[in-house]
Every structure is written in structure tokens, then in C-alpha cells.
Image (cartoon, rainbow, N blue to C red):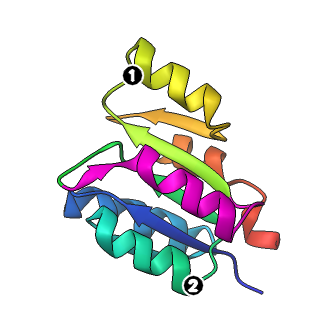
Amino acid sequence: MQARALIVDDEDDIGLMVSRILTKEGLEAEHVNRITAARVKVQEEKYQAYLLDLNLPDGTGFDLIPLIRAQSPHARVIVISAHDGAYEMQRVEEEKVHSFIKKPFTKSQIIEAIQGLESR
């Protein structure tokens, strides 16, 4: 079965770029740019990885984590954000986020964060 990833980022160019990276790595990738749309996807679909921006027009990526954990407890949660202050790092730790990737990021950082998913 092909692993699937949901990218939640309000910057469409970043969503598209990350989608391309994941697709080349053998994952099926979808991108949404709002928390509202992401909530629907999380409830209706199964993903093995969630790549979340923190600063979105209708909330924060942290808002999605409880729903993700309830729907897909074994999914990998990866935060991609320019915000890496003490508060964000504390939340990342509390939420047991798999990886934190600071914007701007490199292709290799994305690949490293999803390594092993393509064989699930």
C-alpha cells in the first residue's frame, strides 16, 4: 500500500513543493491550505504522515494534532514553520511531534522526516 501524506500550509507554493518532494519519494500527497479543510480530510481519509504549518488563517497546526491522534494514532506528525520560539518548541515536545522543520527548509529535511513511510 502506498503511504499517504496530508500537507496543511496556507502558502500554496510551499504545499505544491512539498507535494512534489513527497511524490518523488513514493508517497501520495494532498495539500490543503486551511484548518477547516484539513479537519474534513483527517476525518474522512487515512494518512500515514501529516505535515503541518503552525500559522494558518483559521488556526494553528497544533489545533489539528488531537484530531489526528484520535483518527490515526500511529501517523507521523511533522511541523513545518518559521516560528521556532520557546513556546512552539515546548508545544512540539508536549504534542510528541515526530519532526520540526524550520522554514526555509531543504528537500533533504523533508525526505529525512518521512523516511521509512513509503514502505508501510
> In x, y percent, where is residue 37?
32, 75
From the viewer's side, name the closer residue of 83 and 39: 39
On the question of residue 29 being in view, the answer is no
Query: With 98 as the anchor, is 57 left or right in this view?
Result: left
Residue 84: which disc? 1
Q: Residues within 10 Å of mark 1 (few under 14, many from 20)?
A: some
Is residue 21 inside the magenta stretch?
no
> Which structural element holds mark 2?
loop
Amino acid type for the residue under numbered disc 1: Asp
Amino acid type for the residue under numbered disc 2: Glu
Query: With 76 as the anchor, is 90 left or right in this view?
Result: left
- Indicate the quadrant where residue 67 lies: bottom right
Q: Which residue lies at the image location 46% right of the left edge and 79% below the top edge?
A: 41
First in sequence: mark 1 or mark 2?
2
96, above or below 23, in the image: above
Query: With 46 as the anchor, is 19 left or right in this view?
Result: left
- Classify the position of the N terminus by image quarter: bottom right
Is residue 66 inside the magenta stretch?
yes
Label 1, label 2: how far apart the Cα atoms are: 29 Å
> In x, y percent, where is residue 24?
54, 71
Q: Which residue in the protein does label 2 denote?
A: 45
Q: Which residue lies at the image location 41% right of the left edge and 60% below the top edge?
A: 18
Region rendered in magenta: 58-75
> In x, y percent, where is residue 71?
66, 70
From the viewer's side, name the closer residue of 17 and 69: 69
Q: Residues within 10 Å of mark 2 (few under 14, many from 20)?
A: few
Residue 65: which disc? none
